[in-house]
Amino acid sequence: MRPRRLSLAVPLAVAILLAAPAYVSGYVLLGFTLPVSPNQRDFRVNQGSFVDATANNNVTPQANFPGSTGAAMALWKAAVEWGSYRHGPNPSGDPTQGALGGDPGNSVFVDNPLGNFDFTYQGVTTTAGGSTGNVISATQTSIGPGVLAATFLPGGSGAGGWQMLFDDPQWTWDDGPTAGVSGWCIQGIGVHELGHALGLGHTSVAGATMVSGAAPFAVSLRSIEADDGDGVTAVSPSAYGPVSATKPRITGLSGSFQTGGLLTITGTNFAATGNTVWFTNSAATGAPKTVTGLASTGAGTSIAVTIPTSLPLPADGDVLVLVPPGTLGAHLSNAWPLDISTGPPPTLTTIGPNPAPIASVPATLMTITGTDLASTSSVTIGPASIVGGALTTSATQVTFNLPTPFTAVNLGPNTVTATSPSGTSNSISLTIDPANPPVLVVPPLTFGGSTFTADTYTIPGNFVILIMSPSNLPSSIPGLVDLGLGAGFSSIVVFPTTVAGVAQGKATTSFVVPTGGTPSSVFYFQSVSIPPSVASPFPSSNLTQTTLLF
């Protein structure tokens, strides 16, 4: 792993120095590029690792960097500086320069392209990401004397991923956004280090961002200069630049910015079919949230895409368009900011079936109806939450299997709410009924000398008899009881009677498994539930089985 270290030195004046490579005239290429497929254009920020008060005190919203603050916004701006075109509908974002993104000469009036390269901001994470996670963090362990920051390139290349560390113990870091920083500029150092991550070494051209020396605090490094841009475009067209005449470009967004809504992406050079839209992923895994197989209209100038409602949801961040075959920088558009509107919180109308049993075989499929349900991330029933992949959502419906047995709740009414990124819904009520017919739950495996526990869920107050047999041939007394084990009652063990409790209708039978049994033997269990009135026939539970390990 070859680190690119940004260090502090004091020759004639305080300067920022990067250890290697040696000075040369003009830009230096490190000999690798970041691929689009598999994607290595992503980056994430471990914002919480920047602990200086000045590193995260910029909490003023910025339209071109929606949802971000502090160090995360500063580093997002740093990445945008290397992008192919200006970021967003105007060049705002940094009061120290004319425009962020595109040609170094861009301003509020000029929007020329740079190369076929664009980072994709993939949000804030709480992990350092490892050596190939493309995560920018502040380390609380000093990197080395005088070192400001380092970009680690496994094997000397970032093509398989990279890691960037800012040295927090030695230095005070500042998130800007003005030039009057009171510590080292996160954005400026970030631009320099991201230049290493994308494959640029040092230049000897004075004033360039990738030069090995710069003014204290590094605010001037925020804006790349002509030599830096030349370095990007010098890489072969199949990788970065110069910008391809057929590279897709986003010029605007319209329509709905709400999850589940129809977003219109306007631009040029979109493919007729097979476009993929990348969103910033709320899970912050590094992989963008994608919608594939999209057609364009208007001769490749417009794409309509429904903002996903499936988990993980898209988040405030960037949107990009990848055109087929999707393997080169010239196939990936510029990054364009998207402020996701999550809309109102869910409204619940009904839940069914209502009542629902505390246990059933198979599990009970529940359906909640209402409005604004597409982004539901969890459903709470009483004290229990059902989350993530267990939920299937649409704008007007949420479905899920009720856990069986639902041990977290008691019988009777329970409050139900749904939560989405927009907030928590109104409350409705779900009544949990006793299991009828009975449901038996036993461990699938056991061993000699262990305590075996069997739980039967049935009507409170009923008498419960647990029956065991090595045979799954049925036994029956017509009009009284029918069992799926016992071989005509010729091979059964009947355990002492228990009584189902009031809270959940649960009866528990426990015993110590005898030692000396034959390994891999299978034993079958079934319960009979007898009402206090002794009215027959007596309902029997599901047939279960346990394997004796040893």
Image (cartoon, rainbow, N blue to C red):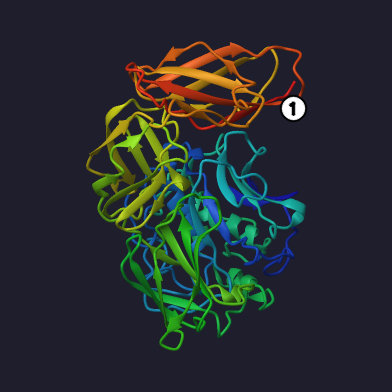
As rendered, which of 54 and 487 lies closer to the eye? 487
Image coordinates for residue 436, horizontal then vertical, percent: 38, 31
Image coordinates for residue 149, horizontal then vertical, percent: 61, 46
| Vertical relation: 43 (above or below) 80 | above
| Vertical relation: 113 (above or below) 505 | below
In-image side of 355 versus 307 (left or right): left
Q: Secondary structure at mark 1?
A: loop
Q: Is residue 220 visible?
A: no
Label 1 crowd (10 A; few <14 / some 14-19 / many >=20): some
Identified at 38% across, 69% down, the residue is 91
As rendered, which of 482 and 296 lies closer to the eye? 482
Residue 88 location, quadrant: bottom left
How many numbered badges does the structure rendering display? Answer: 1
| Vertical relation: 125 (above or below) 336 | above
In-image side of 515 versus 187 (left or right): right
Name of the residue lying farthest toward the front: 478
* Type of amino acid at the residue the image marks with label 1: Ser
The residue tagged 1 is 520
Identified at 60% across, 26% down, the residue is 488
In-image side of 93 versus 133 (left or right): left
Q: Is residue 517 visible?
A: yes
Image coordinates for residue 42, horizontal then vertical, percent: 56, 58
Name of the residue lying farthest toward the bottom: 299
Identified at 73% across, 51% down, the residue is 154
